[in-house]
Image (cartoon, rainbow, N blue to C red):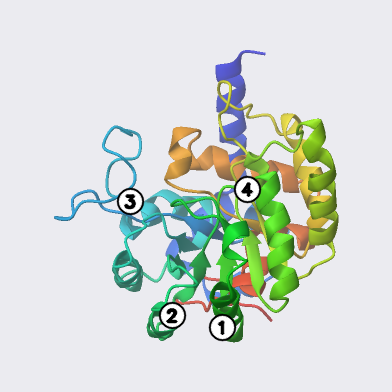
Amino acid sequence: MNNDLSRREFLKASLARASFPAVLGSTFTATAASMRPTAVDEIPVIDAHIHLFDPSRPQGIPWPARTQTALYRPALPPRYRRLVTPLGVRGAIEVECSDWPEDNQWVLDVAETDPIMVGTIGNLEPGKPEFPERLAQLHRNPLFRGIRYGNLWGRDLGAALTGPAFVAHLKLLAEMDLVLDTANPTVRLLADVVRMTDLVPRLRVVIDHLPGMPLTVETEAKASLASSLKEIGERPQIYVKLSQVLRSVNGPASREIDAHRDRLDRIADVFGPDRVIFGSDWPNSDSDATYEEVLAIVRAYFQSKSLESAEKYFWRNSVAAYRWIPRDPGQPKSS
């Protein structure tokens, strides 16, 4: 089949199926949102992984680099809203992409301006003396839902777990009913997540972008991966984002769901229907696929699942993980 034709037909079908929420637009009320959908594409979507930044700020931004031309322009709520509203996306959670501490407040200020934003995941470093005070300050804003820690900004979760202050600060995070998102999963990081939840069993953890990690690994790592996934599968406080499905590695990723089904099935089997969450990784995803393609591929995957499972993936599980509160009448509410 001609690849361009296949891609056009895939998007056309997906956008046609999304016509229900698109037609409703801003009139998609809380009453309508609470009604059970009759098809996957009628389910309102909460995107649990987007990034916000503005290269035009006087101080600039630490990421993305100016040379990343596909990304280097303002990624702010109005642009996101225009892009996703016709596709049935009703809200989003920002995940910090800046290692500048002051950008925690910048993102919260930006998110406050548009009710499409239902939460932010910030950048604070447990183990640092200032962590408790800064966490308490940020936690006063209900949009602040947790922090990000993992293979990012030169940090090493496994090494950090040996520090008593680090573990004590993770316990503080759990006591505040906040979340820890991981970053850039590897076999080692999954093992570290198991160790972390041994030490802090009350801490909710969200593993980001696991579909973007090769699950076929070298022989010496297979035992560790299998052991970690088994342990993670038995821990209800650990969630996963089925995101970066269309990540380009050796050329563009296939837009056909059958090319990704086995990998997604393996992850879904580990976590079950109650712990998988949608995240687009916008606008970082623009380097690999359009937003329409990112959403269409996971909608295609959930066509073969129950509507209840699809609803959990597209918004209900994000409520369980992040405890976000609706800010807009069009956003769904848990019953």
Q: Residue at x 66, y 75 (%)?
A: 203
Q: Amino acid at mark 1?
A: Leu
Task: Give the image location of residue 98, x and y in percent.
Answer: 36, 56
Residue identifier under label 3: 75
**266 shown above or below 33:** above
Residue identifier under label 4: 185
Residue identifier under label 1: 172
Q: Residue at x 46, y 48 (%)?
A: 282
| Among the 4 quarters of the image, the one containing residue 200 | bottom right
Q: Residue at x 17, y 55 (%)?
A: 59
| Among the 4 quarters of the image, the one containing residue 273 | bottom right
Q: CA distance from mark 4 to mark 2?
A: 25 Å
Check disc 3: other Cα within 10 Å, few if <14, some if 14-19, many if 20+: some
Considering only order in the chain, which callout, 3 or 4, is on the residue closer to the N terminus?
3
Q: CA distance from mark 1 to mark 4?
A: 24 Å
Considering only order in the chain, which callout, 4 or 1, is on the residue closer to the N terminus?
1
Q: Amino acid at mark 2?
A: Leu
